[in-house]
Amino acid sequence: MPFTPPADAPRCAVVDLGSNSVRLVVYEGRSRNPVAIFNEKAVLRLGRGLQSTGRLNEEGMAQAFTVMHRYQEVARAMGAAPFEVLATAAVRDARNGPDFVAALSGRMPGVPIKVLSGAEEAGYSADGVLCGIPEADGILADIGGGSLELVRLEHGTKGPSATLGLGVIRLSERSGGDLPAARTIADGDLATVPWLDDGAAGRDLYLVGGAWRALARIHIAQTGYPLNMVHHYTLDREEARAFAVMIAGAGRRTLERLPAIPRRRIDDLPYAATVLRRLLRSATPGRVVFSANGMREGWFMRRMPEDVRRLDPLLAAGREYARWLGRDPSLPPALLDWTDPLFPAETGEARRLRETACWMSDIGSRDHPEFRAEQAFLRVFRQPGIGLDHHARAFLALTIGLRYEAAPDTPFLQPARALLDFESAHRAETLGMALRLAYTLSAGTPDLLAGTSLNVAGGRLVLRCEEDRGVFAGESVLRRLDRLAQQMRLEATPAAARDEAA
């Protein structure tokens, strides 16, 4: 019998039927950050041979019927509704695309199958990127097997778009498997996009698509980067250019020996690297930012109410953690106010991170005490939340690990430290120690926290306690106050309310 989701956690499912692969994703809830609870991909290569025959690959179509039947049954069994199919370049461009869609519809009655135009595909991809990077500014480039979608992004607003026949399968076939020819074709196609180099210099290039995610994974493995996560992985222009040159110029045997190389992508990667190199030359971005979000997340976000779409994804992630794992969702705003005196000159972005840390600060409350610090740290550092770039992950994870009293030099904190500069790490340490002190005083309740305050005055860190409210400066409080004062290079001073009155 199919599962029936609770009313407050509905499920929906989308199939991305592409030129190279087909993927089903099932999402749960109405969240600012899409929560994928099932994700499965099959490589069909529907677009293989399309350039020469004008038709979808026969073997790929036969496999598609089997795979799509499975996906329909998975969605039904998981209680996901709606269940929709989005078909992209290969299906829209093939002469037999309409017949293929009709055959699929006959086998899947009642399931919407939408063949996207290039502009529609670009729009969905842009919505997906903006889901995680609301203020994205630069050029979005989404590469598939059949096409490359480009979108101009202006501080979170979608601008003009273009669709080019530079997907990795199509470019390989257009060039006859010759990379110098592929480079010439890419240059010619990119030159037809008049806005590509108009004001894009120095801004970001956002890369979406499986072939480019594969490049990111290889680079992460090669460099020993401390967080094995593609989403928000960032390279400066010259580093990206050098890497693209290396991949495009490497032979198959060299590629096979690279760490984290996906076997199914080996033939595609030189073409993905070639397109990337030509894009870097045409748009001259300052940075390359890899995004795990794309068309599917864009589809999900279009289903969300406007008030959900307007939320800050980072703060929304923090509030979701508080709702799922915290003991009292009214405490985080009180913690934000309580820690205000420690950060008098913080920027808006720094305050945003501090507020998110307050929302996440009780996520280990139900974990085993012996493993609480590490478990809470890893939960933040490796969470799938879309709104967190790598700096935010590292800052929040270090803060939460120290809030649960991990030793500052404990090994599991080191990957986060490697991603932070000295000032950011110092802020995370200060905030983590302050939150630990707050929880020791308050037992995780805003009522008890209200009987205390923390202030900086005359080189002293002053903790004020109202003992008639059930809080006092016992041994554990004094120890944690001293640690925080040392961190801030201040002298610790506990003071009862009655002492201050005297």
Image (tube, grey):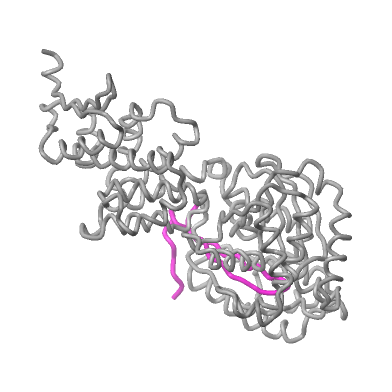
The answer, for residue 226, to whether it is visible in the render is yes
**Can you give x and y, in whole percent of width and height, for residue 229 in the image?**
51, 61
Q: Residue furthest top?
A: 502
Find residue 412 and report its image quarter. Answer: bottom left
Residue at the location (13% across, 24% down)? 496
Relative horizontal placement of residue 281, taking residue 429 as reference (left or right): right
Q: Quadrant of the N terminus?
A: bottom left
Residue 105 visible: no
Q: Is residue 232 left or right of residue 426?
A: right
Pinpoint residue 438: horizontal percent, then vertical percent.
Answer: 24, 37
Q: Nearer the viewer, residue 70 or 337?
A: 337
Residue at the image point whose x is 37% and y is 49% from the top: 398
Query: Which image quarter is the C terminus in?
Result: top left
User: Relative to 295, does residue 496 appear above or below in the rendering?
Assistant: above
Give the residue drawn at x 26%, y 56%.
372
Q: Is residue 10 magenta?
A: yes
Q: Tell me residue 2's x, y (percent).
A: 46, 73
Q: How many marks?
A: 0
Q: Residue at x 20, y 39 (%)?
A: 480
**Dividing the picture into quarters, in which one does residue 174 lie?**
bottom right
Q: Which residues are magenta?
A: 1-30
The percent position of residue 136, horizontal first and vertical second, equals 64, 45
When the figure is inspected, residue 455 is found, relative to residue 374, above or below; the finding is above
